[in-house]
Image (spheres, rainbow, N blue to C red):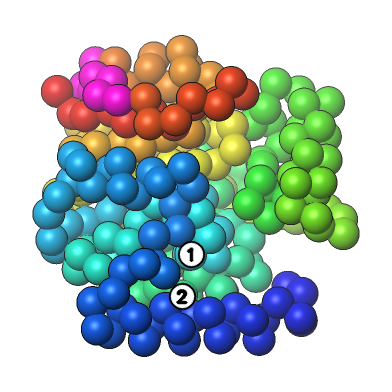
Amino acid sequence: MNGLKRPYRAMARAARSACEAVGVAWLSRPALYAIDRKLERHLDIDGGFFIEAGANDGFRQSNTYYFEKMRGWSGLLIEPVPALAAECRRNRRAPVVEAALVAEGYPTQTGELHFADLMSTMAGALEDAAATARHVAQGLAVQQLSGSYRLQVPARTMSAILDELGINRPIDLLSLDVEGAEASALRGLDLARHAPRFICVEARDRAAIEAVLQSRYRLLEILTELGSHQDMLYVRR
């Protein structure tokens, strides 16, 4: 991680913590397109439970940071990039699992990740290698990153993670943003046992996502419409 950014982020974290300690939330709503505010319309409760996959550093663009810090929620964060997972642990109370989410029956225990910070993506998550290259190049340009790299990361199903951690309580919200791998990640969630009340998902292939969810969920709201993708909110039937 850029050494110049680390002191700034530490100062920003200290300022947020000071505001949060006195109940001031104005630094604690980092979700892109005000998604945390939109979610709160449907989840206006204290003490809920979340899973956020694609957690990044636990703060930037997080859909669950506000709920943890200001509404007393607990939960689980899933982030495959080791450096980002380490930063996530500094920013959050919730436990962090370093893994990429895959479908049940995934053939190997690891997968190849193409790093682009907030736009990192798994090999095979997008249409083809050319689409992956375009996505990574866009991520580097938008975030002004110096370069990308590839790394092997643990590949696990969401239900395997929940079983290993002994999480059997009701899940109020699953926030899923894994840059094209959302449908595969959902196929690794045993909805007969682990069915979140709400699922907020970044959808690049809405049909593939709804093919997994349609028997148990209905679309509640399109939270954002961006052309290349949508942020969708589904509610359990």
Residue ID for mark 2: 91
Q: Is residue 146 left or right of residue 171?
A: right
**Among all residues in the image, which is located at the extreme right?**
146
Say the numbered circle drawn on residue 210. Answer: none
Residue at 31% x, 48% y: name it: 37
Q: CA distance from mark 1 to mark 2?
A: 7 Å
Q: Residue 75: where, in percent of width, then height? A: 29, 61
Q: Residue 96: where, in percent of width, then height? A: 44, 67
Amino acid carrying label 1: it is Phe
Q: Quadrant of residue 41?
A: top left
Residue at 87% x, 59% y: name it: 146
Residue 224 visible here: yes
**Quadrant showing the N terminus:** bottom right
Q: Residues within 10 Å of mark 1 (few under 14, many from 20)?
A: many
Q: Is label 1 in contact with label 2 (beta carbons under 8 Å)?
A: yes
Residue at 75% x, 35% y: name it: 135
Who is closer to the viewer here, 234 or 35? 35
Determine if the magenta segment contains residue 62: no
Who is closer to the viewer here, 129 or 31? 31
Q: Quadrant of residue 106?
A: top right
SS state under label 1: loop
Amino acid carrying label 2: it is Asn
Magenta stretch bounds: 215-221
Say the numbered circle drawn on residue 59. Answer: 1
